[in-house]
């Protein structure tokens, strides 16, 4: 999608041609296209002056950039930024529901609406008066943002990410059957809940970007981004929604919960409950983890992940796989690698590894001889990503990541690499998103070791839409 000449620039994932981007917003299916919006500063490489950028796709593989959809309104409720939100079909009118902030916001947003004025969703009318001016009284809310609208029990509801003065994070819920008349419907879940404390940890003082979707098996999955003054990570819980007699809604946690993504470069999940296909599709934001001076030279910052199909296993844990449409990006002729062989790797590729005994796949080699590796151990049910020789500028280190899977006779791993964006899927049980930047003297080549392992790869190429 991008025209950057930076070798570390993802070419097949959604991002603007230049400057800053962060959260994905409002994934939406309208007519014969998927639409995806995102936080974007069109003028600089910093998180300020936030607009909504816009891309669309016929197939989740090829994306067209449409420039700016929403922009801050002078003297309006979103004068300092159009922050995260969603897009819904309101009686045949695509409507963006988003956080608007003014210059004195201090973490509290208003809930704003904008209506599309064309079928391509490229022209929007932003309404001058918010539908919710701020958080509900009496809860001492100090963080309030990121509306997400969903349907349950025949009505339309909305979540808001929140934090409170005593350090408790929460998700608030509103009844918004009438999108222009919202009613506060209680605290859906907060950090005092034991299941939430186990799944989300106790570090966060606010839960951002709350997302909720139903699975084909009847579970509900709640995902949040964990905020402690800065972005931390993401997590999820499976459970049930309960509507009380007073019209309040709450979340009863089930057996599943934990990290949404085990990598260190994934945040701000955004989900599309695609009623046409019956799938829940999820994207996240992957930030830059290289030094600021390198980001400045590159001229761009941030990228969205590949779309993921989300479901749950019988035990309530997540089932996550890449959207099958991504196979449209595969070159017509695959490549393979036998144990002991070395093969050059392109800048973007899709790798499928199947191991029936312990095996190691090397993807990148430094001049020191250190390697970027993925180790598969079917007997213990572990997949280990070791990137020790490729340091990160963020403070959370480069220690190997271990992705757990059920032990068994066969272990399958999918590795999606697009420039510096690496997405690792351990079977359908766990995923990790990491940014790994090639240096000019690194050697990108595929090497395989093991006695019973098969590796098939495809270079990513622009899809043929004819």
Image (cartoon, grey):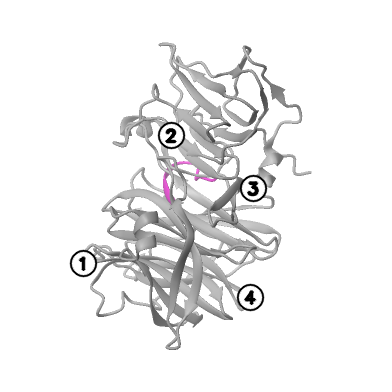
The residue mark sitting in front, 2 or 4, is 2
- CB atoms at circles 3 and 2 under 8 Å apart? no
Q: Residue at x 45, y 35 (%)?
A: 402
Up/down of 5 relative to 189, above or below: above
User: Which of these two is toward me, 65 or 232?
Assistant: 232
Which numbered disc flags the more N-terminal residue, 2 or 1? 1
The residue mark sitting in front, 2 or 1, is 2
- CB atoms at circles 1 and 4 under 8 Å apart? no
Q: Which residue is mark 1?
A: 165
Query: Residue 348, located in which quarter of the rendered image?
Result: top right
Which span of residues is magenta-colored? 14-24
Up/down of 344 relative to 11, above or below: above
Residue 288: x percent and y percent? 39, 38
The residue mark sitting in front, 3 or 2, is 2
Please tell me whether residue 20 belongs to the stretch shown in magenta. yes
Q: Which residue is mark 2?
A: 401
Find numbered disc 4 in the image and state the secondary structure of the residue it sits on.
Answer: loop
- The local crowd at label 3, few if under 14, some if 14 to 19, many if 20 or more residues have their Cα within 10 Å, is some
Up/down of 230 relative to 73, above or below: above
- The local crowd at label 1, few if under 14, some if 14 to 19, many if 20 or more residues have their Cα within 10 Å, is few
Q: CA distance from mark 1 to mark 4?
A: 40 Å
Residue 315: x percent and y percent? 55, 55
Please tell me whether residue 428 belongs to the stretch shown in magenta. no
Rendered image: mark on residue 323: 3
Which numbered disc flags the more N-terminal residue, 1 or 4? 4
Which numbered disc flags the more N-terminal residue, 3 or 2? 3
Q: CA distance from mark 2 to mark 4?
A: 45 Å
């Amino acid at each position: 999608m991008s025209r950057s000449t930076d070798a570390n620039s993802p070419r097949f994932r959604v991002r603007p041609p230049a400057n800053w981007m962060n959260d994905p917003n409002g994934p939406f299916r309208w007519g014969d296209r998927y639409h995806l919006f995102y936080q974007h500063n069109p003028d600089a490489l910093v998180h300020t002056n936030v607009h909504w950028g816009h891309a669309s796709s016929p197939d989740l593989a090829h994306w067209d950039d449409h420039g700016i959809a929403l922009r801050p309104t002078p003297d309006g409720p979103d004068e300092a930024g159009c922050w995260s939100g969603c897009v819904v079909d309101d009686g045949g009118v695509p409507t963006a529901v988003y956080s608007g902030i003014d210059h004195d916001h201090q973490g509290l947003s208003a809930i704003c609406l904008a209506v599309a004025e064309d079928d391509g969703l490229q022209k929007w009318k932003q309404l001058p008066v918010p539908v919710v001016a701020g958080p509900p009284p009496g809860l001492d809310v100090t963080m309030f943002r990121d509306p997400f609208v969903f349907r349950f029990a025949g009505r339309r509801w909305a979540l808001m990410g929140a934090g409170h003065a005593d350090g408790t994070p929460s998700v608030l819920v509103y009844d918004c059957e009438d999108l222009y008349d919202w009613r506060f419907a209680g605290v859906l879940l907060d950090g005092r809940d034991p299941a939430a404390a186990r799944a989300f940890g106790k570090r966060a003082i606010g839960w951002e970007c709350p997302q909720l979707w139903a699975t084909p098996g009847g579970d509900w999955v709640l995902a949040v981004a964990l905020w402690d003054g800065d972005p931390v990570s993401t997590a999820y819980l499976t459970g049930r929604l309960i509507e009380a007699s007073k019209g309040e809604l709450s979340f009863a946690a089930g057996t599943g919960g934990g990290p949404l993504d085990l990598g260190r470069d994934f945040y701000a999940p955004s989900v599309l409950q695609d009623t046409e296909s019956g799938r829940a599709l999820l994207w996240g934001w992957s930030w830059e983890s290289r030094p600021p001076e390198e980001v400045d030279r590159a001229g761009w910052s941030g990228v969205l992940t590949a779309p993921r199909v989300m479901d749950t296993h019988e035990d309530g844990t997540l089932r996550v796989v890449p959207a099958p449409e991504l196979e449209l990006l595969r070159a017509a002729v695959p490549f393979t690698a036998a144990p002991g062989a070395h093969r050059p790797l392109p800048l973007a590729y899709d790798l499928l590894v199947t191991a029936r005994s312990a095996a190691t796949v090397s993807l990148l080699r430094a001049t020191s001889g250190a390697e970027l590796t993925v180790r598969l151990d079917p007997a213990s049910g572990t997949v280990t990503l070791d990137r020790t020789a490729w340091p990160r500028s963020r403070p959370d280190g480069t220690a190997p990541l271990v992705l757990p899977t059920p032990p068994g006779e066969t272990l399958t791993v999918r590795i999606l690499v697009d420039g510096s964006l690496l997405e690792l899927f351990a079977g359908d049980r766990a995923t990790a998103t990491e940014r790994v930047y090639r240096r000019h003297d690194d050697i990108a080549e595929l090497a395989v070791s093991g006695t019973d392992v098969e590796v098939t790869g495809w270079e990513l190429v622009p899809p043929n839409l004819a």
